[in-house]
Amino acid sequence: MPENKGRDLPLIVYLQGGPGGAGPRVLNASSDGWIEEALKHFRIVLPDQRGTGRSSAVDGRRMGLVAAEACDLGLDEATYQAEYLKRFLADSIVRDFEYLRLSEFGAARWVTLGQSYGGFLTLCNLSTFPEGVAASFVGGGIPHVPASADNVYAHTFPRMVAKTNAWYKRYPVDRERVTLLADRLSAGDVVLPDGSPFSVRRMQLIGGGLGMKPAPERLHNMLDLAFSEGDGSAGSALAAADGDASRVNVNRGFAEAVLANTGSSSNPLYWTLQEFIYADGELDRPIRWAAAREAASRPEFSPDARPLMMFGEAMFPWMFAEDPALQPFAAAMDVLMEDTRFGKLYDTEQLVSNEVPLQCAVYFDDLYVDSGLQLDTLSRVGRSHAWVTNEFEHDGLHGDVVFKHLLEEARNRGDLEGIL
């Protein structure tokens, strides 16, 4: 801000959500809710996580180069790729950021602000480099410690049902549209614009954003263009097909929207690393597709079930066979899903004795990061404070209330003395 010109402001580093998330590209001070408030008090640092943004991109081409390197070394390609992908998880990311702090900012202690996966990075950072942190803030992203992908999905799948049903209740016409679309896609002859199968299970992925605002409205608008004939309703589309669901024409514009919503070309690391963010050190057993295992135990998530339930931030092995952007990662995924050796993320003793003030917004109805698990973790983190609210969804930090509230709480508590 112009009024801050020449001021020696404290640093605040933004720990982006993800995994595989690049730092935000800001258009102006009000383009992201927390930024306008932060600019009044801090100099903001917006780093890209390794493999994203201006870092060397980890995509299909990169995986091919890694495989070629393994071949030159006489090593197994899939195993080599798997070891490579492990270097893009939280233990490596926080070391990158610590190097950035030491090399570019004169080792000045900074404040951290984590959103979603950024909360995982926050606890990893407080476990590893607490001396570099003056204070921490987190919006909707405290991981459960001890970490367990199985535990996470056992808690979040019931909430996926609740979020889907809440959407259908708000827009009953969408329930009818989704039912007709599922019946049509069951024939198996519809493809997305990139040539990948437009299957029922692929459509279930459009619910990935139901834990954000205003996701129901976005999905409602998307489904408004689902059919090529009729007035947009399922009834008129079916009537135009003489009552035969297999003859209903799916609108190409809708298919393009589904591809944009569920495709991985812009961020393949998001799905590739999704379950490994819960891998903390030596595991008792391999992860082996935790979300897929949980889904298989719940018949309400079957592609044949009606009403059709949506998935929220859940990855499946079929995605690596059908999505062209994920296919180059498939062999490495087979290896990683059987692996039990990962980098250590959290130091429980260090967290218990933590002296860095930690202010957290815990969204009570969070689809992706269970509020009960978050509070359980925070009960064992020193100097941590939770503001529990059901006013916001998982993306609450991007509004203009959450960060300001956390900042005021920290100041009133005296946790920012000597900083602001």
Image (cartoon, helix red, strand yellow):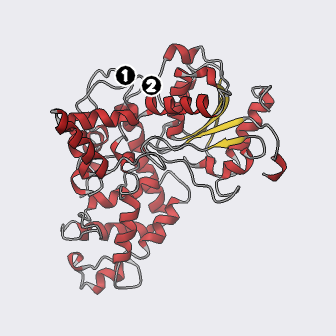
* Callout 1 amino acid: Gly
Image coords of residue 61 (percent x, y)? 29, 52
Number of numbered tags placed on the structure image: 2
Label 1 environment density (alpha carbons within 10 Å; few <14, some 14–19, many ≥20): some
- Asked if residue 373 can be seen in this view, the reply is no
> Where is residue 340 drawn, in percent x and y?
28, 25
**Residue 345, numbered label:** 2
- Category of crowding for the residue at label 2, using alpha-carbon neighbours closer than 10 angstroms: few (below 14), some (14–19), many (at least 20): many
Residue under the image location 25 percent in, 84 percent down: 241
Residue 281: which numbered mark, if any? 1
Distance of mark 1 from mark 2, alpha carbons?
A: 7 Å
Residue 11 in view: yes
Residue 193, image x, y percentages: 30, 70
Instruction: Name which residue lies at 49% across and 37% down.
Output: 370
Q: Where on the picture, by quarter, is residue 201?
A: bottom left
Determine whether label 1 and label 2 are within 8 Å by CB.
yes
Q: Secondary structure at mark 2?
A: loop
**Residue 163 left/right relative to 188:** right
Q: State the residue in front, 69 or 385.
A: 69
Quadrant position of the C terminus in the picture: top right
Give percent across and percent down for residue 86. Answer: 34, 33
